[in-house]
């Protein structure tokens, strides 16, 4: 059975990814804050949510065999291979090695820089059977999470007080595994404690606190990025304790929301949109490149327009591909 809460989180995470890649075009980092900057940093939680959602499902499966995971990895390879070859042919880039393009995309290079996420997932998938055995002992959840949290805190301290620019800039996102494993395992832990979390009474003031912090966070992140990191990119905040606490809070608050009263036709729409999020993730960067050739980015509302059009066009193309059985697998992992 599908989980409408997780489907909604997937949609929100997907919107956040597009926000990151559109809003960065619309503000002058050193010139001052504006709406585009605010919305850009609001998307910071998207990548952590994607890893948490994946861990929530996979590490809580009763049987997690290498046979199953090889199929998952094969699906990723099909997606990565197909889109790189499509672009290789469309660009008539026949003098370049397509294998290098395919492998490069998994390392945040080439035609699809966002495919680094798939590269990290492949590495994580290869370790999941062993990790699941390790996590059968519930105490190991806390031990491993504490270890990964400590690594992240040390890196954040180094970033804040020791070096001029974030240390992560020297490591491709694919290999920042201490970060991705933390979000993956915390997502799995939340899934393993789902019934307890749903029954847990959370004071409305705590919920309000998290919501206020969520909407204040872009201002805080912008200030840190400008005055301490000296670097615009939100990716350097994924190790931040602040972002980790807020990401976990958002996940848990959503998990506790009651969607039982939503009409079935609305649920079906949510399920369908959730199924298209991977297609949007794959396509949106090239939709953005197409749109900025037509729409000149001058003011914050230009980025809002590009954002809306990017979502709409990416959903439309993904929806068409999803309805063609032979092509469906190139937007589904």
Image: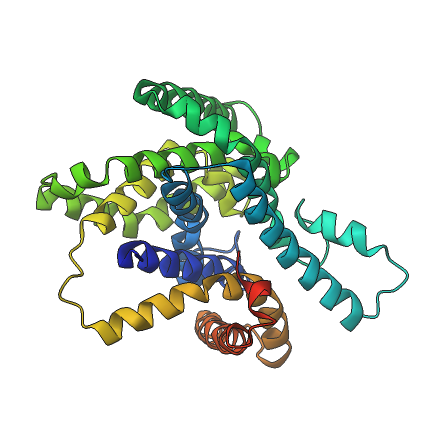
> In the rendered image, which quarter contains the N terminus?
bottom left
The vertical placement of 164 against 103, above or below, is above
Q: Position of residue 69 (x, y in %)?
A: 54, 42
Residue 200 position (above or below residue 19): above
Image quadrant assignment for residue 270: bottom left
User: Which residue is at a point 17% across and 68% down the rendered structure image?
Assistant: 262
Identify the residue at horizontal 65%, vertical 57% (top origin). Answer: 78
Q: Quadrant of residue 168?
A: top right
- Determine the image quadrant of residue 189: top left
Q: Is residue 286 above or below residue 250?
A: below
Question: Which residue lies most toward the right here?
Answer: 95
Between 291 and 26, the one nearer to me in the picture: 291
Q: Provide residue 327's location: percent of width, then percent of height.
A: 60, 71
Whether residue 153 can be seen here: no
Residue 80 left/right relative to 230: right
x, y (%) of residue 41?
A: 42, 52
Image x and y of residue 195, in percent: 18, 40
Q: Left of 164 or right of it: where is 98?
A: right
């Amino acid at each position: 059975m599908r989980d409408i809460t997780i489907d909604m989180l997937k949609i929100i995470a997907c919107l956040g990814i597009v926000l990151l890649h559109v809003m960065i075009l619309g503000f002058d980092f050193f010139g001052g804050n504006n709406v585009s900057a605010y919305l850009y940093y609001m998307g910071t939680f998207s990548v952590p949510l994607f890893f948490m959602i994946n861990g929530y499902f996979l590490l809580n499966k009763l049987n997690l065999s290498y046979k199953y995971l090889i199929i998952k990895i094969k699906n990723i390879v099909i997606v990565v291979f197909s889109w790189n070859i499509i672009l290789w042919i469309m660009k008539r880039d026949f003098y370049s090695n397509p294998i290098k393009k395919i492998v490069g995309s998994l390392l945040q290079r080439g035609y699809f820089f966002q495919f680094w996420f798939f590269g990290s997932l492949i590495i994580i998938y290869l370790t999941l059977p062993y990790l699941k055995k390790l996590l059968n002992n519930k105490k190991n959840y806390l031990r491993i999470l504490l270890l990964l949290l400590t690594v992240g805190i040390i890196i954040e301290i180094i970033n804040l007080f020791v070096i001029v620019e974030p240390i992560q800039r020297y490591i491709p996102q694919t290999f920042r595994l201490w970060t991705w494993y933390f979000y993956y395992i915390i997502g799995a832990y939340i899934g393993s404690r789902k019934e307890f979390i749903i029954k847990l009474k959370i004071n409305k003031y705590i919920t309000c606190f998290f919501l206020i912090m969520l909407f204040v966070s872009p201002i805080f992140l912008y200030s840190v990025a400008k005055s301490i990191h000296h670097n615009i990119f939100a990716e350097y905040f994924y190790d931040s304790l602040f972002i980790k606490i807020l990401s976990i809070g958002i996940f848990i608050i959503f998990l506790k929301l009651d969607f039982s009263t939503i009409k079935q036709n609305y649920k079906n729409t949510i399920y369908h949109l959730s199924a298209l999020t991977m297609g949007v993730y794959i396509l949106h960067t090239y939709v953005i490149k197409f749109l900025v050739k037509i729409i000149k980015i001058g003011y914050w509302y230009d980025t809002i327009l590009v954002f809306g059009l990017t979502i709409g066009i990416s959903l439309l193309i993904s929806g068409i591909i999803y309805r063609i059985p032979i092509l469906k697998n190139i937007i589904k992992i």
